[in-house]
Every structure is written in structure tokens, then in C-alpha cells.
Image (cartoon, rainbow, N blue to C red):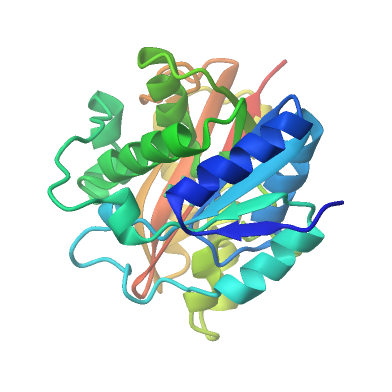
Amino acid sequence: MSAMNVIVDPAELQQKLAELRAQAATLAFVPTMGALHEGHLSLVKLARKHADKVAVSIFVNPMQFGPTEDFRVYPRQPEKDCELLASAGTDLVFMPTEEVIYPQGWAVTVHPGPVGAMFEGKSRPGHFQGVLTVVAKLFHLVQPNVAVFGQKDAQQLFLIRRMVEDLHFPVRIIEGETVREADGLAFSSRNVMIKNSERPKATVLYRALLEGERLLDNGERSSEIMKQAMQSCLESVPEFRSDYATVVSEQSFTEIDPVPGEARLIIAGHFSAVRLIDNLKFNAT
Ligand code: PAF
């Protein structure tokens, strides 16, 4: 494997991309905000299966954080991230500065449409506009054939697919399965911010999802019953402030009742100031 390139400057990025393209037919891209964990590394491995070369970006995107959110304290560990990426088989890491992504006087953004105002978008106004805008910019800079995103951020994945289709981006979106810690908590860069005393209780999100799944497996199709069951599981942990626990259609990412044979259970809330989200796909077939 050739040495991994770590690039900050967009002109240098274009030069390295041209070199990679001369050696390889296809390029896969994994956008990240760094603080990498096993979930990210599984996306890099998946990317390798779908293309000859793999590029990863690390950029903590200020536009997707609200004014009272955790942008300032979001974990940052660029050196460690680069070591992890080198051993996972990454060819190129792009770490743009804020000035590159948001140049002086920038004004144009990508609006996510109605689904962008629901669930995560309702609790975090402007979040998905920030996500889609940065992903669109990164797609233009990197020009990948394939881009890989985790199912853990199911609404983000839905909206990125929507953007790619609606705006005719020439990129194929691949989704990677959620990777979980041994006790079921989904890997997230924010997990390191959970207080030690609250960490064992953070499994409540996955337990609530499994309870919803159990009901579905037993033939329950009332979304209301599903929501109540997940909610009462979440309420069993008083430290967790739940935001939503519901069932959405895989096709429209809107709530559905009764639940059809294919759906997604989605959950979000806070331990102290740390926001956690999780989801589970249900497929009766
Ligand atoms: O999922 C993330 O880490 C971010 O939302 C993304 C897609 C890298 C955009 O900043």
C-alpha cells in the first residue's frame, strides 16, 4: 500500500486526486468529523470493497451545530485519527480549514426540504442544511464515484440520498451498518463525552429499540403501542431526557401507522448535555 497523503490545501487535493485517478479506476469517499471510532473504520473498510482508492475527510462542520450545541467541545484528535486511517487502508485524508469550506462572503446553501425539519431537524434547527451544504461542497472537491455513510445517522443518510437524487450528483451512496459496543451502545464520537456514572445507562436507547423490535416480531403493528413501549423503556432511566421515539417509513422517513413490513425505529435524547441517537431497521420478510 502506498503512503497515505494528508492534505489541507484544495489545490494540492486536486493534484493528488489526479495522481490517484491515473492509478485507479474508482474512488470511494468517507466524510467524517474525526474523533474516529470502530464505526468509522468499518465505513473505510466498506469503502475499500467498493473502489480502488479511498479518501476520507475530517472536518468538524460548524454549520451543522446550533448556537448552544457542542461545536466547541466536540472531540478532536487529528493525529490519532490519521494513524487509525493509515492502518485501515486509507489512501488520502483531506482536512480542510474552515476558510476553505466557508470562504469569506459565502452565501449559498443546500436546503433539505420537509424531512429536514423533522426529528433531528426539529430539535436541531438548521442541522441538516449544514450537513447537506458541507457534504455537497466535499463531493465537489473530492469528486468520488462512491460515498459511504453510516446507518447510525439514518435521517442524515436519507437526506443525502435525496440530495444526490434531486441534484443529480454523479455519486453512488453506500450505507454501512451501525457498529455497537459490547453492551449494545452504538459507537458515536460523542460517547466519550458521556459521564462515567451515566455510561452503563446509555444502553437504554438500544434496549428501547429492541423492545420495539420484539413487539413488531410478535406481530404488533400499532405505531402508538410501539412508541409507548419504547418511551416507557426510555423513562426507566431518569437521567435520560428523551426527545423522540417513533417509527418511520423507509421510503419517506415520515411517521407511519400501522407499521408496514419494512420500517425504521428511531430514537433520540440526552444524557446531561450529550445528545445520543440510534435506530433499528425492521424488515418482516
Ligand atoms: O456524519 C457526520 O460525521 C457528519 O454529519 C458529516 C456527514 C461528515 C458532515 O459533516
- Picture residue at 45% right of the left edge, 19% below the top: 169
Q: Nearer the viewer, residue 80 or 156?
A: 80
Q: Is residue 7 above or below residue 78?
A: above
In this rendering, would 156 be left or right of 98? right
Where residue 149 sits: x, y (%)?
A: 57, 39
Where residue 247 sits: x, y (%)?
A: 45, 31
- Picture residue at 49% right of the left edge, 20% below the top: 259
Give the residue furthest to the bottom.
Answer: 197
- Picture residue at 36% right of the left edge, 56% below the top: 61
- Picture residue at 66% right of the left edge, 66% below the top: 82
**Res. 116 image quadrant:** top left
**Res. 121 image quadrant:** top left
Where residue 154 sits: x, y (%)?
A: 50, 37
Quadrant (top left/top right/bottom left/bottom right) for the C terminus: top right
In this rendering, would 5 be left or right of 232? right
**Res. 212 image quadrant:** top right
Q: Nearer the viewer, residue 140 or 113?
A: 140
Where residue 8 sits: x, y (%)?
A: 48, 59
In this rendering, would 261 be left or right of 91? left
Q: Nearer the viewer, residue 207 or 254?
A: 254
Q: Is residue 172 above or below residue 30?
A: above
Q: Nearer the viewer, residue 131 or 201?
A: 131
Q: Is residue 260 above or below residue 177?
A: above
